[in-house]
Image: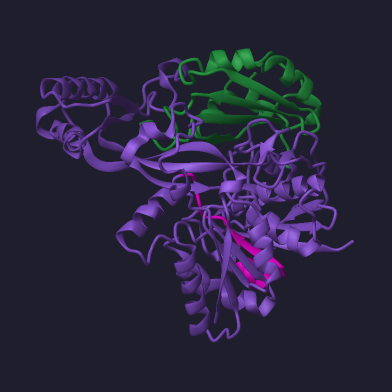
């Protein structure tokens, strides 16, 4: 099962730092997401992209996590040679993360 | 409890104009706010001003004001914007001129200045947040602008301004200023200021909270994106917020669109550093309050740090780039061969570069080979980009890609090249005390 089946995500940028949210469609899935989408796992996933450490902030009241990746944007949005200098597409890469199966996964109402 | 209605008229310099017109006409707004300055925009504007003293403000300012001044006057809506960029005084004069042309006699336009701190910090040895010190950048520095807070905006509104034009203000401050003015929030009412920053942060990217930058077909569908509506915030005196949009506009306001924007560009959600307050979003809750209505509660705040962030623009050499496409059988192999040829040519010719990238668009250009599994695509596009100190060297990058037409692999097409000077941004923190803001008024 992919993270994309139970969560959505958006990337933001601040200088050379990428921020990536992971938000449960159903707040009931937050503990499962918090258990499996760890800072270590995200750091490993993006090892080829981000040079600095990855921090994770927890927002249980929103059913969301916020990841902060230092050194992820090729020296910063204004200097980077990267095609996607803002790192906008990183959220889509994170949603590809493989998770253990959840019986009810696949419901994502737009509410 | 008293409440006011704030609308977002733009989320970046090039944003659509019709959604702002729609809000000005039908939004029953107290304030319409246009946020148009990205990190680098003001450095580019500073360059425009150096070339022509009368310029340096947002290129779309006149078009936007022509479109919304009259309906805003009719509806009793006041306008706040950072479209002054590097020249708020010239921008305010232009707004006054547009108002005169439209017969809006008596409209008062305020310019907020003082964010330009280049003279204050020039020659100082302030530390850069990216590492190193200001002195390392030498004579390459072209601009330094402090992120000013909401107080001068509130003061301008208090003095009767119908339009307030700033340069570099913190984005949420454009919304916090009207809230401070409307509700008389005190400078040490940290909780309300924190809630006001939350309002500004949620609304400042305009369509990004009404379903823009959100759609993912089959997973997150959003109706009517071609006529996406911009958001309206209904804010009560205690700082609670309802985010909504016009019924007639496209898009959607849902708990999901609000949560995505809430965390957008935020590092530690408990410490969002702003000039007026350290906002704390860590205990915010959102819930649906009807169709396209989402309630936001639980924002907090702590005392501000007394420091202001400064964006420093500096010349950082040139970037040269070239691209070429390959399609059909063997496209990926021909693309890889093309990249190897260009790499070897740049070495043979001794083109001086400080950094270079050789990308295969369609295969692994965005996230590298590790993350980019999957079969070969039908078509690929090569992209070579390099940083150089001199413009001539940058030009050589695209030229070498272009010569693939007659010297490279079979079937290359759609060649494209560019050279651009780079204005980079570094950041520093300075004591609030070195920044003093001024208000100037222009009456139509």
Q: Residue at x 60, y 79 (%)?
A: B107
Q: Looking at the picture, does residue B91 appear above or below residue A99?
A: below
Q: Is residue B141 left or right of residue B205?
A: left
Chain A takes which shade in the image? green
Viewer-proximal residue, A37 or B47? B47
**Residue B256 in picture, x, y percent from top left:** 71, 40
Quadrant hosting residue B111: bottom right
Q: Residue at x 45, y 34 (%)?
A: B125
Asked whether residue A51 is drawn in magenta, I would say no
Name the quadrant of the N terminus of chain B.
Answer: bottom right
Name the quadrant of the C terminus of chain B.
Answer: bottom right
Q: Looking at the picture, does residue B125 appear above or below residue B299?
A: above
**Extreme-right residue of the structure:** B1
**Residue B411 in picture, x, y percent from top left:** 18, 31
Q: Which residues are magenta?
A: B22-39
Q: Is residue B1 left or right of residue B51?
A: right
**Residue B101 in picture, x, y percent from top left:** 48, 84
Q: Is residue B37 visible?
A: yes
Q: Residue at x 32, y 26 (%)?
A: B359
Chain in purple in the render? B
Viewer-proximal residue, B69 or B215? B69
Asked whether residue B28 is drawn in magenta, I would say yes
Q: Is residue A80 visible?
A: no
Q: Is residue B71 left or right of residue B140?
A: right
Quadrant hosting residue B3: bottom right
Q: Residue at x 68, y 74 (%)?
A: B160
């Amino acid at each position: 099962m992919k993270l994309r089946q139970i969560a959505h995500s958006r990337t933001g940028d601040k200088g050379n730092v990428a921020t990536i949210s992971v938000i449960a469609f159903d707040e009931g899935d937050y503990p499962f997401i918090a258990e499996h989408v760890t800072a270590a796992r995200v750091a490993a996933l993006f090892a080829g992209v981000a040079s600095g450490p990855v921090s994770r902030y927890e927002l249980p009241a929103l059913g969301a996590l916020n990841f902060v990746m230092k050194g992820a944007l090729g020296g910063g949005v204004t200097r980077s040679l990267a095609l996607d200098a803002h790192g906008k597409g990183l959220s889509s890469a994170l949603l590809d993360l493989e998770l253990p199966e959840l019986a009810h996964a696949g419901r994502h109402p737009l509410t | 409890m008293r409440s006011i209605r704030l609308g977002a008229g733009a989320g970046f310099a090039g944003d659509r104009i019709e959604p702002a017109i729609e809000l000005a006409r039908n939004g029953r707004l107290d304030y319409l706010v246009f946020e148009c300055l990205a990190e680098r925009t003001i450095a580019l504007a500073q360059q425009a001003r150096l070339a022509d003293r009368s310029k340096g403000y947002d290129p779309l300012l006149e078009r936007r004001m022509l479109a919304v001044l009259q309906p805003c006057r009719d509806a009793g809506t006041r306008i706040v914007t950072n479209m002054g960029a590097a020249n708020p005084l010239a921008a305010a004069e232009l707004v006054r001129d547009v108002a005169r042309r439209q017969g809006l006699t008596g409209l008062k336009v305020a310019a907020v200045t003082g964010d330009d701190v280049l003279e204050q910090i020039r020659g100082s040895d302030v530390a850069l947040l990216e590492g190193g010190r200001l002195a390392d950048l030498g004579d390459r520095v072209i601009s330094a602008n402090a992120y000013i807070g909401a107080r001068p905006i509130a003061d301008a509104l208090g003095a009767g301004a119908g339009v307030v034009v700033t340069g570099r203000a913190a984005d949420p401050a454009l919304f916090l200023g009207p809230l401070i003015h409307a509700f008389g929030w005190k400078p040490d009412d940290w909780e309300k200021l924190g809630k006001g920053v939350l309002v500004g942060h949620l609304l400042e990217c305009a369509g990004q909270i009404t379903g823009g930058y959100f759609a993912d077909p089959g997973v997150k569908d959003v109706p009517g994106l071609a006529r996406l509506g911009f958001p309206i915030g209904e804010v009560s005196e205690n700082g609670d917020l309802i985010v909504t949009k016009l019924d007639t506009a496209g898009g959607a306001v849902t708990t999901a669109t609000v949560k995505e924007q809430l965390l957008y560009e935020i590092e530690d959600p408990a410490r969002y550093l702003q000039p007026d307050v350290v906002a704390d979003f860590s205990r915010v809750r959102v819930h649906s309050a009807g169709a396209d209505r989402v309630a936001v509660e639980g924002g907090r705040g702590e005392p501000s740090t007394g420091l202001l962030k400064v964006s420093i623009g500096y010349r950082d050499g040139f970037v040269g780039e070239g691209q070429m496409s390959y399609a059909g059988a063997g496209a990926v192999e021909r693309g890889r061969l093309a990249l190897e040829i260009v790499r070897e040519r740049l070495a043979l010719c001794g083109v001086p570069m400080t950094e270079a990238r050789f990308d295969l668009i369609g295969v692994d250009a965005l996230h590298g080979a590790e993350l980019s599994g999957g079969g070969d695509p039908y078509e690929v596009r090569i992209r070579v980009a390099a940083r150089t100190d001199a413009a001539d060297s940058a030009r050589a990058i695209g030229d070498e890609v272009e010569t693939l037409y007659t010297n490279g692999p079979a079937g290359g097409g759609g060649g494209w090249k560019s050279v651009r000077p780079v204005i980079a941004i570094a950041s520093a923190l300075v004591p609030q005390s070195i920044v003093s803001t001024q208000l100037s008024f222009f009456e139509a």
